[in-house]
Image (cartoon, grey):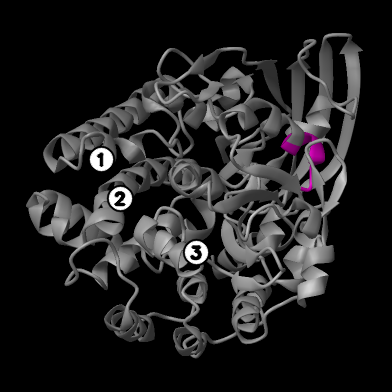
Amino acid sequence: MREIKLFALLMLMLFKCYGQNIVIKYEIKRDSSFHTKDKSIGRIFLGIRRNKWDGFDPASLQNTVVSRISYLKAPTLENDIVTYNIKERGVYFIDDISGHQILLDPSLIKDTIRLQLSQNHFYKTDPSGDRGLYLNDSIMAPGIFKITYPPQYKYVGFFDSLAYLHEELHGMQVGHSFKELKNNLVPYLKGITKIYKDRVNFLKTFTTQYGIPQSLKLYAQKEIEYSYYDNLLIPLVQWDTELFQSYPRDLQDTINNFAKDVNNINLFKNTSFHRLILTQYIALINSKQNKGPVNFNKDFLDNVVYYLKKLPDNEPKAYVISWLMQVYSGKADESAVETLYEQYTPDHSRQATNSLIDSVYQAVKHPGFSLQQMLNLSFENTSHVNKTFKELASKKIILVDCWATWCIPCLKQLPFLDLVIKKYSDRVQFISLSADQNLNKWDSWIAKNSGNRKDILQIHAPGGFQNIFFKKLLINSIPRYLLISSTGEMLNAAMPLPSDTQEFEKELNKHL
């Protein structure tokens, strides 16, 4: 018996090191609306990435493709047969703008997964005037493709099915309803709780009808649960932490219940929501005494450092430290960055984490370019013409939004950034700098969205994170917002997030 257990442990270790290959066949129905430089649509739009869509771990952005064969079966039908190496079970994303969230356990996949894809043409203009793709009259689409999953692997696309109920879990509509309800807490909490219960019931029905493997059920449950936590935390973190006392006791307990998951490395790695809730939860519990949104002042720093000292040295703790260092670097608080840097213990098994934390620290201690170097930097505009920063600069102050089409946290900041743009566009130039390595994907996103965002200049950094702008400024994680003068002076290398409107505008006003 002991030998069997040792053998099983050895197999598990080998699996985590080398992973297992799975094959997905994308059967893509093409139409004349696709205009790309590459003949293969699949090569441009489709791939699988880990759940780490926030760019925290640069290795998560590396493609898991082992091999790929693309060919036209007919003028309107493309086949892409792709072999992926998958190391862990959990939540993944099929690329396609914001992406289709999927469940994968490679040990359960014994044959090729055939996915049928067709382009979604259901465009709609919402009340704010923004035009986007929709699944139906009220639900926004996560990408440009509709995917049909085969019966035996229907569970892989569970989240696509769930999206038809109340939008995808990472959708941007539900999170803003607190503002739309004029900060009226009772109907807001009632609404998001109904959505949560509907999703839980849908999971039960789906499991009964199609089945979800036991090894993946936890991740489906946790994604739904954490999405609910996200909506519960928004009024507290973004509006007023004192509202916590107005929450019903059962919802207070629900939020406090996340404490048991803070150090869960499995959920940190293999769900997409854990790290988002992790940062918001820690921000809240160290700010409950403050009125208004989370205030990253000295009291908060003292509280959070005390809290961090009690956590084990692991990936969740490292993630929180890196996030907080970026917050305080945005406030140009070198002392706070130093204090947080001292809380981190480097580990050879966390190379990506070491690199990110060191890069934030160095960015604060040793800012990047000379004035002339900054002015001479070259970027690509939407016509694929290279322009220097000096040629692009049209106002005294320039706000640069570093983002990518695949970055869901970046997309979630857009509504907040757009509000700032409307208020400051006469005095500040806004530039959107894409880190996309796939130029065609960026082109496609711009074609579908730029009409609604005419007051922000869209440019692209060739090579993405390997571009000298990102490397020299040590930008390993997005979204990132920089404030630069028209003379090339770096005014703030890590602005607050636009969702922290008060702090964001305060920093802008310092330089106007």
User: How many other residues sit within 10 Å of disc 1, few (<14), some (14-19) or many (≥20)?
Assistant: many
User: How many other residues sit within 10 Å of disc 2, few (<14), some (14-19) or many (≥20)?
Assistant: some
- The quadrant in which the N terminus is found is bottom right
Q: Secondary structure at mark 1?
A: helix
The residue stretch that appears in magenta: 437-442
Q: Is residue 441 magenta?
A: yes
Marks 1 & 2, CB-CB < 8 Å contact = yes
- Name the main secondary structure of what is drawn in magenta: helix
Q: Residue at x 91, y 22 (%)?
A: 71
| Left or right relative to 505: residue 438 | right
| Left or right relative to 28: residue 432 | left
In front: 66, or 190? 190
Q: Quote the CA–CA distance across marks 1 and 2.
A: 8 Å
Which residue bears the numbered disc 3?
512
Q: Quote the CA–CA distance across marks 1 and 3.
A: 31 Å
Nearer the observer, disc 2 or disc 3? 3
Which residue bears the numbered disc 1?
178
Q: Quote the CA–CA distance across marks 2 and 3.
A: 30 Å
In front: 395, or 303? 395
Q: Secondary structure at mark 3?
A: loop
- The disc label shown at residue 234, or none: 2
On the image, the x and y values in percent for residue 107 come to: 64, 44
**Label 2 amino acid?**
Ile
Marks 2 & 3, CB-CB < 8 Å contact = no
Q: Secondary structure at mark 2?
A: helix
**Label 3 amino acid?**
Leu
